[in-house]
Image (cartoon, rainbow, N blue to C red):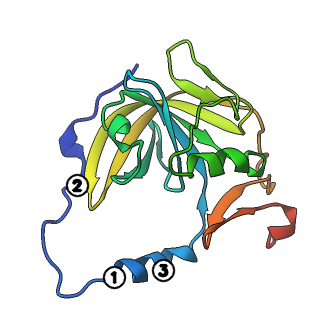
């Protein structure tokens, strides 16, 4: 059963000014050296599906199963994501790098059949043959700076390429403005 979470469960973003702050360029340089997992999020608010690549997906809770991700206001998908009631988060591995690139390319037609996709019985667009996907209900949105943090409750999922505990898998990460594959070669020990 889906539970709605009241908006007051979010911590209020501080409305204060600081005497100094990192510039946008300094902040970007800081995070260029911090790799992130790669996902593609699809949504449809009634006018057709949209998709975008994100590296901000974070698991928040296992019980209830919650995750968050952020969307820049500059994204062409942000308006649809501000109204969609459900989303599909595709968790990608190195085999899905072309889909990650497609979702990150401004102006690209992300549903032109270059990458096979279909609609779930509930109507959401899902890309075929990705490592895993999870269908989620949007439970809250919070405007922060020039982005929106979207909190979602996981409803159903499918894993096509599982990673066994302790194994490196074939993870896809975004690091220093490029795509990288994690695997046995990058494992630092157990």
Foreground label between 2 and 3 = 3
Provide the residue designation for mark 1: 23
Q: Position of residue 60 (x, y in %)?
A: 45, 48
Q: Secondary structure at mark 1?
A: loop
- The CA distance from mark 2 to mark 3 is 25 Å
Q: Position of residue 13 (x, y in %)?
A: 20, 60
Tell me: residue 134, above or below residue 34.
above
Foreground label between 3 and 1 = 1
Tell me: residue 2, above or below residue 159.
above
Q: Is residue 31 left or right of residue 18?
A: right
- The CA distance from mark 1 to mark 2 is 25 Å
Q: Position of residue 161 (x, y in %)?
A: 78, 38
Q: Quadrant of the C terminus?
A: bottom right
Q: Position of residue 137 (x, y in %)?
A: 41, 29
Disc marking residue 114: none
Q: Residue at x 31, y 32 (%)?
A: 83
Q: Quadrant of the N terminus?
A: top left
Crowding at mark 2 (Cα within 10 Å: few <14, some 14-19, many 20+):
few
Crowding at mark 3 (Cα within 10 Å: few <14, some 14-19, many 20+):
few
Provide the residue designation for mark 3: 30
Provide the residue designation for mark 2: 11
Please tell me how many numbered marks the rendered image carries. 3
* In contact (CB < 8 Å): disc 3 and disc 1: no
């Amino acid at each position: 059963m889906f539970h709605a979470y009241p908006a007051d469960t979010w911590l209020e973003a501080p409305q204060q000014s600081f005497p100094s702050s990192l510039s946008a360029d300094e902040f970007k340089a800081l995070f260029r050296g911090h790799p992130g997992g790669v996902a593609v999020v699809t949504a449809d608010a009634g006018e057709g599906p949209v998709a975008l690549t994100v590296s901000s997906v974070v698991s928040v809770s296992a019980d209830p199963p919650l995750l968050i991700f952020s969307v820049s206001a500059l994204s062409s998908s942000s308006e649809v994501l501000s109204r969609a009631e459900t989303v599909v988060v595709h968790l990608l591995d190195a085999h899905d790098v072309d889909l990650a690139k497609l979702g990150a390319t401004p102006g690209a037609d992300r549903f032109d059949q270059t990458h096979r996709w279909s609609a779930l019985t509930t109507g959401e667009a899902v890309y075929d043959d990705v490592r895993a996907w999870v269908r989620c209900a949007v439970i809250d949105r919070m405007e922060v700076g020039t982005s929106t943090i979207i909190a979602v409750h996981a409803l159903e999922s499918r894993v096509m390429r599982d990673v066994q505990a302790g194994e490196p898998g074939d993870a896809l990460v975004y690091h220093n403005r490029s795509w990288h594959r994690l695997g046995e070669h990058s494992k630092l020990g157990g």
